Image: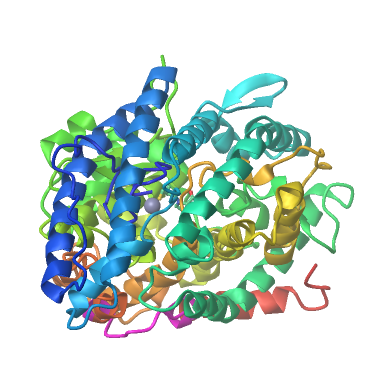
Amino acid sequence: MKRLPSIVSIIALAGAACSVPAFADDAVQQSVPAKPTAADAEAFVTAAEKEMYDYIISASRVFWVNATYLTDDTNALAAETGAKGTEMQVRFALEAAKYTNVAGLSDETRRKLDKLRGGIVLPAPTTEGAATELNTIATNLQSIYGKGRGTLAGKPVNGSDIEAAMGDSRDPDQLKEMWASWHDNVGAPMKDDYARMVEIANQGARELGFKNVGAMWRSQYDMSADEFAALTEKLWQQVKPLYDDLHCYTRTKLNEKYGDAVQAKTGPIRADLLGNMWAQEWGNIYEVVAPEGAGDIGYDVTELLKANQYDPLKMVKGGEAFFSSLGFAPLPETFWQRSQFVKPADREVICHASAWDVDNKDDIRIKMCIKVNADDFTTIHHELGHNYYQRAYNKQDTLHLDGANDGFHEAIGDMVALSITPDYLVEIGLLDKAKVPGADKDLGLLLRQGMDKLAFLPFGLLVDRWRWGVFDGSIKPSGYNDAWTVLRLQYQGITPPVERPDDAFDAGAKYHIPGNTPYTRYFLARILQFQFYKAACDIAGWTGPLHRCTFYGNKEVGNRLNAMLEMGASKPWPDALEAFTGSREMDGTAMVEYFAPLQTWLKEQNKGKQCGW
Ligand code: X8Z
Ligand code: ZN
């Protein structure tokens, strides 16, 4: 994620961790005049931006040290810094509310006031001690996740290792053990604290005039919260048929591999069989579902990386080279000195990948625990997309130091990774030209891609459907786990491999729940990245099948992309979308078009099968 994971109060806009350093002396304390004018509102916004800017830089350093060296001390420092940040943000939000009805506000000032009012990920009420309690809980939850262990053959396994093992193992008993131990050990202990955190943050949201935290999250998309919820539903309905076809086909293949006792022919898919701890992307089990003939795409990115002696550093250099080929300046020396590429041997860290912009200028970094495999090669491109975005908009005002919306931020690196086609792999020397799969292997290529991209869609949606319910009170703490399991069944058509204990809190076993990172952004990004990719391929003059297009080396694509990136959040997101794609709508058509041949083929394969669950 691009922004400080989990620091409760980080402004939803600063491209990195944020924090509240020494604003005590020069804090914006001006009182709102009895009859405020537009000029008063502007003066307030300018002062708030300055205070926030300084805070972000100092706080980012605290959060970085905490995330890369988890101890009781760094947790205490992060919680303290986070609490100051929350207090600062809430102070600004309450003050911003007093200016929103002032006559004569410019569009820009109005948008900035809206960001100040609603852009707090976890607000706290002004009650004495509330910000501290909230940040202490949030820091603690994230730390529990970072230090979490599941087991394999009874032995403890850390998060990044167990994630990789879920991709590699095809033994249903091993998979079951890893799935159950991870969910039991990591999620369950968080439940009570999580419920308390929700309670405090909702009080904060209500003080700011929102119904609850979920409504605040939905308010940040240049439209009403209800319109935004409806937009996500519309997008889902556009792409859902693709998921349904893929689910049906994959279930058949799993049944053939494992037999009825492990995976039945009908009903939901067992959640641990899909090559990923959360069943969110299924590409790791491609070989299980690969069709005869057309399925043999002739290479596997993990094997290519290993055969070519790639190490984590070389993988990151490869990601940088792609962006350089588009005309982006090389990453600064400090990126290479300060990033965390591999899991340190001697201390606990948060391995979940993130990208940081510590000084709002050029001190960009990634934090990962890279393994030499295809998943992490993609994730490196994803994270670098955040870093290049952050650097591109670094001249914007503080409140515009962000993506056009959070889905844009998540989509840039993914769009680039879609360009990792066989031809591109040849170009960078990873694949022999003679091994480029011919047109008869297109279905295999599309299925490999669909196993990651299509499979993710319902998960991308349901995480916040659950959280919206938690925040609006329709899902109560006693029903947290049942509601999670029901949504997983309803949207993804999957089921836990073991009965869940009464105290289970399976949502907590997914990083973004303890990390308090809104998740709808990833759903939006799944859709947007295909819109961006298609636009880039059009600019590059590509005329072949969309999924074979690589825009590697195309400076015009780089220029047009940069024009969108450097806008940051300075304009409503449709303006930014239009700058690069010519369209003002988020729309699933490009994704549907990309996968159209696969869908036709899947329907053929599924004939006579009882699809659905
Ligand atoms: O969290 C991430 C990135 C960091 S923003 C690694 N992603 C989501 C996830 O891992 O669940 C990228 C895809 C979805
Ligand atoms: Zn991200």
- Residue 308 seen from this side: no
Locate the C terminus by quadrant: bottom right
Residue nearest the viewer, comparing 109 with 370: 109
Q: Is residue 36 left or right of residue 120?
A: left
Question: Can you give x and y, in whole percent of width and height, for residue 502 in the image?
Answer: 82, 39
Question: Can you give x and y, in whole percent of width and height, for residue 467 in the image?
Answer: 59, 57
> Which residues make up the magenta segment?
579-592
Determine the residue positioned at 14% across, 72% down: 556
Q: Is residue 256 left or right of residue 309?
A: right
Q: How is the image coloured?
A: rainbow
Determine the residue positioned at 29% across, 68% down: 98
Q: Is residue 128 left or right of residue 107?
A: right
Quadrant housing residue 31? bottom left
Quadrant housing residue 158? top right
Whether residue 314 is in magenta: the answer is no
Quadrant housing residue 322? bottom left
Whether residue 585 is in magenta: the answer is yes
Residue nearest the viewer, comparing 139 with 80: 80
Residue farthest toward the front in the current orientation of the protein: 34
Residue nearest the viewer, comparing 453 with 335: 335
Q: Is residue 126 left or right of residue 538?
A: right
- Residue 505 seen from this side: yes
Determine the residue positioned at 65% across, 62% down: 292
